[in-house]
Image (spheres, helix red, strand yellow):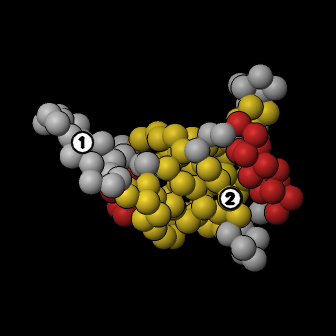
């Protein structure tokens, strides 16, 4: 895994303000979520954190199947990275303060903001244009 490319991916996530998070449940059913932040875990060299108000399905997927794909992409420049790794930990970092919906929701909104810690194993180029899935 190229640590310089990982730093570039984190910087790009900071510029775009979004990270796409691909997970799958225990049977392989895929799911995509969007997050707002990605950062390096101090001193790790290959571990990142991704923070969001993840839906319950994303969190359940992390528990059933730790493999994750993180995509950061600048659409205008068509430059990006796909980070492939395993979720090793999920942490609650914020909770809604006394949120109670005034009507019964068919699909509950997330009540906790969470940070997922991912051990990155591969970094691939990501773009709309032609590219290979050869590790950066």
Q: Nearer the viewer, residue 61 or 95?
A: 95
The answer to whether one can see residue 121 in this image is no
64 up-or-down from 24: above or below:
below
Q: What percent of the width, then of the height, locates residue 105?
A: 18, 35
Q: In the picture, which quadrant includes the N terminus?
A: bottom right
Task: Kindly identify which numbered label has been placed on residue 129.
Answer: none
Going from N to C along the chain, the mark reached first, 2 or 1, is 2
Residue occupying image coordinates x 60% and y 61%: 49
Give above or below for 18 relative to 86: above
Q: Depth check: 93 or 115 in front?
A: 93
Locate residue 87, reporting x and y percent: 51, 64
Residue 119 position in % (x across, y down) = 62, 67
Q: Residues within 10 Å of mark 1 (few under 14, many from 20)?
A: few
Q: Residue furthest front?
A: 98
Gap in Å between the C-alphas at discs 2 and 1? 28 Å
Residue in the foreground of this view, choosing between 95 and 118: 95
Report which residue position mark 2 lands on.
39
Q: Residue at x 35, y 53 (%)?
A: 96
Q: Is residue 125 above or below residue 127?
A: below
Above or below for 26 versus 43: above
Asked whether residue 53 appears in the rendered view, the answer is: yes
Residue at x 86% of width, y 58% of height: 4
Q: Secondary structure at mark 2?
A: strand
For label 1, the residue is 108
Q: Position of residue 64 (x, y in %)?
A: 35, 61
**Corner quadrant of residue 72:** top right
Q: Quadrant of residue 35?
A: top right
Horizontal side, residue 3 vs residue 100: left or right: right
Per the image, label 1 sits on a secondary structure element best described as: loop
Q: How many labels were placed on the picture?
A: 2
Question: Residue visible at 52% across and 40% down?
Answer: 34
């Amino acid at each position: 895994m190229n640590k310089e490319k990982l730093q570039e991916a984190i910087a790009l996530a900071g510029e775009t303000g979004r990270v796409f998070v691909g997970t799958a449940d225990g049977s392989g059913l895929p799911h995509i979520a969007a997050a707002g932040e990605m950062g390096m875990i101090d001193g790790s060299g290959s571990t990142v954190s991704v923070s969001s108000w993840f839906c319950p399905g994303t969190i359940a997927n992390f528990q059933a199947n730790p493999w994750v794909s993180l995509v950061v992409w600048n659409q205008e420049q068509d430059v990006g990275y796909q980070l492939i790794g395993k979720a090793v930990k999920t942490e609650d970092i914020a909770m809604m303060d006394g949120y109670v919906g005034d009507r019964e929701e068919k699909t509950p909104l997330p009540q906790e903001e969470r940070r997922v810690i991912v051990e990155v194993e591969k970094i691939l180029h990501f773009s709309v244009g032609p590219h290979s899935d050869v590790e950066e």
